[in-house]
Image: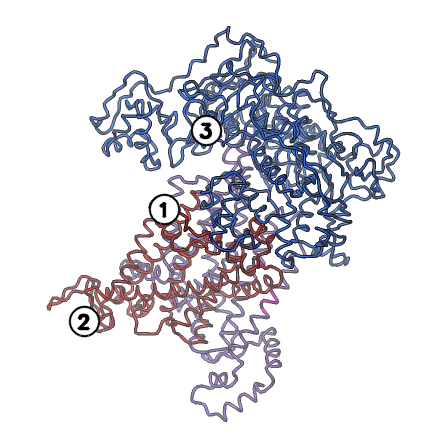
Amino acid sequence: MLAILLRRFVSMVLIMAVISFALFLIFESDKSSVAAKVLGQYSLPEQREIWLEKNGYNRPFAERYLSWVGNFLTGKWGQSIQFDQPVSELLLPRLANTGILGGFVFFITIGISLVLGVLSGISEASFKDRAITVFSVLTTSVPEFASATLLVAIFVFWLDWLPGTSPFTNGFELAELVLPVSVLVIYNFGYYTRMTRASMAEVMTSQYVRTAILKGIPFRSVVLKHALRNALIAPFTVMVLQLNYLLSGVIVVEVFFAYKGFGKLLYDSALFGDIYVVEACTMVAVFVAVLSQVISDIGYTLLNPRIRYS
Amino acid sequence: MAKQDQVPVLECNNLSISYYTRSGEIPAVIDFDLTVNPGEAVGIVGESGCGKSTVALAIMNYMGRNGAIVGGEIKFMGRDMTTMSEEELREIRGSEISMVYQEPMASLNPALRCKDQLSEVLTVHEGISENEALDRARVILQDVRLPDPDRILQSYPHQLSGGQQQRVLIAMALLSNPKLLLLDEPTTALDVTVEAGIVELIKDISAKYGTSMIYISHNLGLILETCDRITVMYSGQAVELGTVSQVFDYMRHPYTRGLFSSIPLPGTDRYSTPLVPIRGQLPLPHERPRGCYFGPRCDFFQEGICGGGFIAMRQVGDDPGHTVRCSRYEEIDWEHYKPDAVVQEKAEFGDKVLEVHNMKKYYEIHDNSLKAMISGERVRYVKANEQLDFDAREAETVAIVGESGCGKTTFAKVLMGLEEATEGTILLDGKDISQLPVRQRKPQLVSNLQIVFQNPFETLNPSHNVGSQIGRVLKKFGIAESKKDIQQKVFELLDIVKLPRDFAFRKPRQLSGGQKQRIGIARAFGGNPSVVIADEPVSALDVSVQAAVTGLLTEIQREKRTTMLFISHDLSIVRYLADRIVVMYLGHIMEQGTTDQIFSPPYHPYTEALLSAVPIADTSVIKKHIVLEGELPSPTNPPPGCPFQTRCPHKGRHGTQQLCETEMPPVKEIGPGHRVKCHLDDDILLRMEPVIEFAKTKKGPSVPAGAITAPVRSRTTKPKPKAKPAARRPAKPKGPKRPRALKAARRGNADDLKLISGVGPKLEGVLNGLGIFHFDQVSAWTKEEIEWVDDYLKFKGRIQRDKWIAQSKKLSKKS
Amino acid sequence: MTDKTADHATPPSGLSQFFKALGLLRESRIGMFGVILVGFWVIMAIIAPLLPLHPPNTPMVPLQGPFTTMEDGTNFWLGTDHKGRDILSRLIWGSQLVLLWSTLATIVAYAVGIMLGVAAGYLGGWWDEAISFFANVLLSFPVMVLYLIIITYLGSSGFNVIIAVTFATGPAIMRIVRGLVLDLRTRDYVAAAEVRGERPLYIMIVELLPNARGPLIVDVCLRLGYTAITIALLGYLGIGLPPPDPDWGKMIAEAQPLGSFGANGAIWPAIAISMLVLGLNMLADGLREISLRD
């Protein structure tokens, strides 16, 4: 158990290291372009040379990379070019906003999909199952920007019930959260539902469930005591792993609704060429993704006695 | 045994079960009768697909979404189960009727401790507290001879061995003291020495608790050991029913007879009394022939008598309780019937082809646990093969026998060059190949050493046709070059394995298991090898097919004078076809010698136990019962000293205990070429008694004397009145107007609409209810009528009945 | 009959399998729906040049609602956008773009994924370690981040979109293929090939790959849908195919700033992409259904 954790941790660090190196290679190996980005297109070559010298860009590549890593680990993430503000100060509130959005989406999605998935999985091929399956195929087929367009057309332009953007200019407002959350839930719950359904349906046809039924255990207990525990292992792992994809969707939705979150920041910075912000955002995103992998692994181990006791 | 005044525990009368699939109603069990009296054990025997497991699940009333009882009744303690509500059934399941399954690992919930799985039976059915339930569970666990019940209760299933898991399941089934215990192939997944323990346990249970049992198995020997009465099933029907001695000694159905002639019993010999396979194969459920289902495979088939209508069970002579589903059994001269079988002459062995000297194969396993990292013991060795020493001559068959984990498959891998030996030499025609991986072997060498694999479903690549897979071998080994030559050679090989030539263009999925195995044999012999390894080539096949495939294998081998290494766990088949036998246990050769030496004393204690564990389907055989204690040790963690010492029944008896537990025994030669690895003194070994003996009044298993003299014909046996299908009278059709062509028209005898594939008893009833009794009525259907009928078939849209009309046309022409 | 080739080295063509599957699909209602939806857009994309449509990039009368007939008798069935371009025409021409690029990108991603997956699964050892690690690194990026980085670094063009899609989905495909191969390589027919001394490349291509195609065909349909979404999404974010081609995502992006005036211009492409993806998902479902049946 501890060994698994340790190994996961090592591979996590390794992946982060490789990615940080790749990022550094992409964005900072060409130092003159860095200077051009920071000082602007119209800055003079001399100015750029002075800036490079002053900021230590004339050192060898490896040394520059190591000091960048050192700075990064100690929270010195550089200065945003676009907003002229330290990246860390910029990033943290944005992360908090995204956390709110992501948290809502994650828990609502899981709630809906577990209920629907289990209901549909225990009565495979019934009308209920077919209806749920078709419904989830339907919703997973509508990508975020399309469902956002349609929902805005209905609830904003036609019914005028909700705001069409979510910039939180007057502080936090729940109404502004409704559309972004709905869009993400609609697109994501179908996949989770089908995962849960498949897992549940498989468990329900397993021999140990047959054993339980033929022991005369009431159907309710068969589902709750025998089936659920085994059926939820796979969906749990996948749901946590899918945090990664959720994050992708969050970026799109934040852009669409002008939601001041981490995704919008990353998008704006990438288009602007605000390299320090992009670097920091990417590292944060990757960290979240890798961490979710570790959590998923640990969860799988804890949920599955076959691994826990062997 | 059966007393007439008792209420039978279970009674199945005219039971018919169908499955509904996309191609219609497929009858799985037809007209099945079974009576189980209190305290009685009834066996159901049959090959795969004969419907025996369906019967078991139907008794539990658990047939899945698409299965249903379509006729007859199942009475449990006099109450009809087919009419019970779901709640009534639930109360019976697990408390009055319980079941033990084929795969113990899959049948236990992996996420729950055994204590939860055991106690819930009692808390649900008897409403007692968890603690009381656990107390009772402890007692039962002791009864099923599991040591340390508390540890078992705390364990998860995966922490137990297969044998222990099965014992837990048996304990679970016995917990609430059921009246009826269903055992569905309870030992099939287990090793033979473990099986022997379970079988003994089952026998004790019926003695101790008086529980009635239904024991389902494909193995006649197991039925003989456990049951009082037996039902033989074939293609969904019971074909013979009687007490064990009636059926085993006076069998009166050609299929039963065929089964017995195709299993190797002690006394059969491939040279003098070769096995007789049943020709052909089991018909698919929707392709069953008219009349007797066994007809096309039967030597006594007569069109007029056997090919007509339904054949009912009849009593055999004046032998009460012995019934058979055969119209001609009286006319068959059972005593003088000798089916044709090719009798072979004993081959002369040539020079040594294969010599294995002191071969060892160790696997390294890397232990990545933290404990191992700290202690530095990161690499451990699995000693899969230790000191293998044996040889094989030209045209000789050497069998390697052992249970799982004994290293027989590893040895095959080393031989084939898929693994390299750790130490020692393997000489093939004098050349050492022990360190030569297959990719470094020359084509000549590779083609010299080929293998027949175990699993017929994996041996052929499903994506390519059969001909190309054999052809590839020929091309690869330079047997044939041009396309035409390859084609020709492929055809010749198909001839050799007795398959039609057009099989070359078929995909593997169009072949049956036995046919696939024949292709596997053709492929192995394609390159004219000098040595063929047969890795359990028939263990996945049904017994009747097994005989045909082994016959073929030995025939080709003899003709080509190939050396064969026959790897198997099945001592009966090994006895039948091997010239010499190597017995392995945990990577060691425990004993080797000629077949006669192995099967008669002196034995190695392990061989003795192994011989005793094999169930034998012959009532005249008297076996010494030796049941090994404990489980098979894991090859990753073998015991010190003799590998067999943890289970050896001789260990404590002759003062060698100390020695056995600490030192590896020496290899002793106790006869010419007969070597034993054991600490026991020679005279103790020599004093051993034979495990298998024939009773003094030995009768050949298939030559029943007494039955023939019985005045068979004097008594006309009344065929049982066939239950009338439920809906014979035309029901008043509601719904849309009846098309004119479908006017109720019943003329004389109704045709048997069930002959249309996709129509079973249930659908026939529906059709009869609509006034459809004859094939020509169906064949005259137009679109309008089809639609009208569809309204009455509840499975509208799910049943493909486009072929009914064409079939009916053919059938109405025939009748 | 006699000239039927007995050459082992010719696996059955994937195309014939595909058409056979299409025939079987008739039995799956959901699959049939999928075929109809996907077929609709494929046919539209093919016959676009033959249809009597307004030119897709020519400004005419801006911001007309659906079903407008002008005084001169010109019809705008779905209206026009803010630049006065005919929405129906842009939608249909746009289908060409989405289908073409998503198919190309999927093919490339699959080629890479299959090669790496088979190698990792069959060869094992260091091959597997290296390939799997590389895949894990790429899978640790949220896909959008990967797209943003790759395209802002390489610039936006159709070719770069293919590269980005390959980087983002190749590892996932590789993992699926690797899993399938790990299962298949334990089969006896693979051992049979090894035992007759076949080379690894032969085993991978002839013995393993043809048997993995079943689950992969289903995955291709799903993956095509995701890629179509990705192409449109990149268009929406302004980093997809360069203007002025009528890209569905870009149509939404251009209409969005106009608020309610733009709604008509945004709804249609949103419906179009959803239809196409729904069709592909249903097709995948149908294929899965019939593959489970036999």
Q: Which mark is residue C61?
A: 2
Circle 1: element type: helix
Q: Are marks 2 and 1 on the same chain?
A: yes
Gap in angstroms between the C-alphas marked 1 and 3:
27 Å
On the picture, is B622 further left or further right than B702? right
Is A200 drawn above or below residue B306 in the view shown? below
Q: Quickly name the residue at label 1.
A: C24
Q: Which mark is residue B28?
A: 3
Chain C shade in the render: red
Residue type at mark 2: give it. Answer: Val
Gap in angstroms between the C-alphas marked 3 and 2:
71 Å
Asked whether the viewer can see residue B39, the reply is no
Q: Which chain is purple?
A: A
Nearer-the-camera pick, A8 or B102: B102
Circle 2: element type: loop
First of labels 2, 1 by sequence position = 1
Chain B shade in the render: blue
Quarter of the image for the C terminus of chain C: give it. Answer: top left
Residue type at mark 1: give it. Answer: Leu
Q: Position of residue B344 (x, y in %)?
A: 63, 32
Q: Position of residue C218 (x, y in %)?
A: 42, 53
Most distant residue in the bottom direction: A46
Q: Main secondary structure of the magenta part?
A: helix
On the picture, is B390 further left or further right than B500? right
Gap in angstroms between the C-alphas marked 2 and 1:
48 Å
